[in-house]
Amino acid sequence: MDDVERAILITFDESGAIDSELKSQAVNFCQQIKETPSICSLCIEKLCFCKLVQVQFWCLQTLHEVIRVKYGSMSLEEKNFVRKSVFSMACLEGIDDKMCAVSDSPAFIKNKLAQILVTLIYLEYPLIWSSIFVDFLPHLSKGALVIDMFSRLLKALDDELVSMDYPRTPEEMGVAGRVKDAMRLQCVPQIVRAWYDIVSMFRNSDPEICTTVLDCMSRYVSWIDIGLIVNDAFILLLFELILIDGLSEQLRGAAAGCVLAVVSKRMNAQSKLSLLKNLQLSRVFGLISDDNDYDLVSRVAALITGYAMEVLECSKRVNSEDAKVVSMELLDEVLPTVFYAMQNCEMDAAFSIVQFLSGYVATMKMFSPLQEKQMLHISQILEVIRTQIRYDPMYRNNLDILDKIGMEEEDRMVEFRKDLFVLLRNVGRVAPEVTQIFIRNSLASAIASSSDRNVEEVEAALSLIYALGESMSDEAMRAGNGLLSELVTNLLSTRFPCHSNRLVALVYLETITRYMKFVQENTQYIPLVLATLLDERGIHHQNIYVSRRASYLFMRVVKLLKSKLVPFIETILQSLEDIVARFTSMNFASKEAAGSEDGVHIFEAIGLLIGMEDVPLEKQSDYLSSLLTPLCRQVEVMLMNAKVLNPEESPLKLANIQQIIMVINALSKGFGGRLVTGSRPAIGHMFKQTLDVLLQILVEFPKVEPLRTKVLSFIHCMVDTIGTSVFPYLPKALEQLLAESELILFGEIVLAQKVMYEKFGDDFLVHFVSKTFSSAHCPQNLAEQYCQKLKGGEFKVLRSFYQSLIENLRLQQNGSLVFR
């Protein structure tokens, strides 16, 4: 081992045992060697003698760099020497009577050698080195090593230059065209003949080398003369390889890949249709079964689905009626196998199930009515959709507890399902009755399925029902067209054994809510809907994600059904007693704050229910008082103890107060201004008392931003609810907001004033000037200017003026500004 080899080994060492300084020296030494004029000779000499793979790789890498970067400055003699030497290595020829050591090296060394040859082809073929392929072919008789090297060369040529699967520069595309044109004229027929002879000769004795050859060949079918492959000899050979039991499964799969390349070749639609018909591909349909090797089944499945896609495309592009009939016959023949493959095989990534099926469904629009065979295909498409949208049971626990794996799988499935549900809607338009029958039967089948599949089957069936509802118009939903009435009845009356599962519970609730327009017209179902939303399937579900979603959906249902729910108010409130009690009787010693998300939605729903004029005044007052009184009492107790809060209790108690403000705000949204200020002023009085209590929060906690924001939000809500009755409370509110405010508060205050001006107009301005500004001893001219700017509507201008005004007033009053 000489110094060069030692240095190369040191540079590749990853053990950590080499001193860093020594490694740095070795790297520098190798770099210096690369710069010597004789570097090509040195590399080729090492490749002849040295069997160390690190040295071989370094030498090949260096040769590659030299050819790419310095080719233009190399002498003719040096170019000839490199060309001859590299070619000799590939063909197992000796270099100066010395056999190259690369022939026994690992695959990555041979791939690097192939890459060098491709670089020479890029630079020299066909103008300088026109005979590389022709010269290579006679050496294939040396056996598997040279055949393997030739295949690596052709694969590298495809990867590095020819294939359009990778982005190419205009220069590279020009060179690729030049190389392909020259090869078509000069050597492609000979190469194809060599492929045929090799596979024929070695199919039994060396299936591995035959597999390599066919995998290589499949890359070239797209741009060579199709007649070289599609002939009695080669096509017969390929189908023999695919169909004969006992041959290597990899070889059979590689042959299927070649036929797929033939099927996928771009050509005139009529010519393509003739080609597809003559292939008689039905002879391989039977290979898609559980009895065969997984890899073989996958490759044959890719062939069959690719063939089906091409037939479908031909059916769209051919013009003659006879051709259209032929294409539909071929499609009808292949579709059952395609459906089976979609449900039972690992599909090729390049094949889009949705794209193919959508294309096929589109062709059905030409037929009215649909024929029996097409109706069968519709059912099979629906079965494919159902299979595809079903979760894998292996993720059941992850999805139920919603850990990281579960969240990733759910996100993936949500995205994956989008196109499938679009397909379902399209199928529903072509064959609505068949679609509804299938979905009804899917639900029945899912309920009866075994426990190990029950969760996924039920979730998929419910998702289909939900998607069906999304595709229906409001009119169709209300009318209960087709089997809809039966479907909704079954849905509402069924209790699933797997209802405790998060996914099942969520999709069930979403689906029930989706069909509310139907329930709106068929009120006999309201008790079933309420039971679903309020019991352990909904708001009282054991899973917090489900119960929170149920709370939101319940609020939506109340908004939609409103007065139709009046007879059920007592029942609803009884069902929600425990939820409401979490807020009306908070245990301030508890270390956990009540959940606010579900509480807000539930209180908003309750407000919508009890805030209707259909509810008698006495009952309405009792309902509202039973909620507002304990909630306000909670706030009052908290405020009385505000001064003695210890640091540990304070965050939790403030959070509880914040949640109480939020649920009061939500509750108030159900009461309209006309009812509160007009027909039932007693209700308005309750809200005024509540506002009085909540304004005290600004006194005790003027700098707690979350509380301040929530109180401001409630004031805004009261502007809509109690109207001008809110005016007497404004000075107090603004006094506390400005007493120790920072600049950021001016925006909130100005926004509040702007909202009230837009709501009440000049009535608000009169009150504001006479009460608020006068108590601050504001000059009349400045007050009038502010009113003009408030009318103007420019928020930034208004805020700037108001801030300047307040700061000037503060200075006049020694920094103190108090509104009375």
Image (cartoon, grey):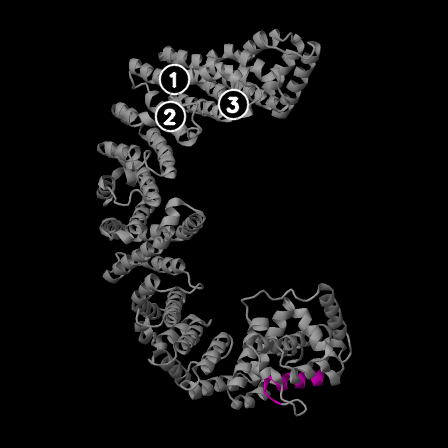
- Alpha carbons under labels 1 and 3: distance apart: 19 Å
User: What is the x, y in percent for residue 468?
Assistant: 31, 46
Task: Name which of mark 3 and mark 2 comes first in the sequence.
Answer: 2
In the image, 94 versus 428, the foreground residue is: 94
Task: Name which of mark 2 and mark 1 comes first in the sequence.
Answer: 2
How packed is label 2: few (under 14 Cα within 10 Å), some, or many (20 or more)? some
Question: Circle 2 is placed at which residue position?
Answer: 582
Describe the element under mark 1 as helix, strand or loop: helix
**199 lies left or right of 369:** right
- Amino acid under disc 3: Leu
Task: Name which of mark 1 and mark 3 comes first in the sequence.
Answer: 1
**339 lies left or right of 803:** left
Question: Circle 3 is placed at which residue position?
Answer: 707
- Alpha carbons under labels 2 and 1: distance apart: 11 Å
Question: Circle 1 is placed at which residue position?
Answer: 630
- Where does the magenta region start and end? 79-93
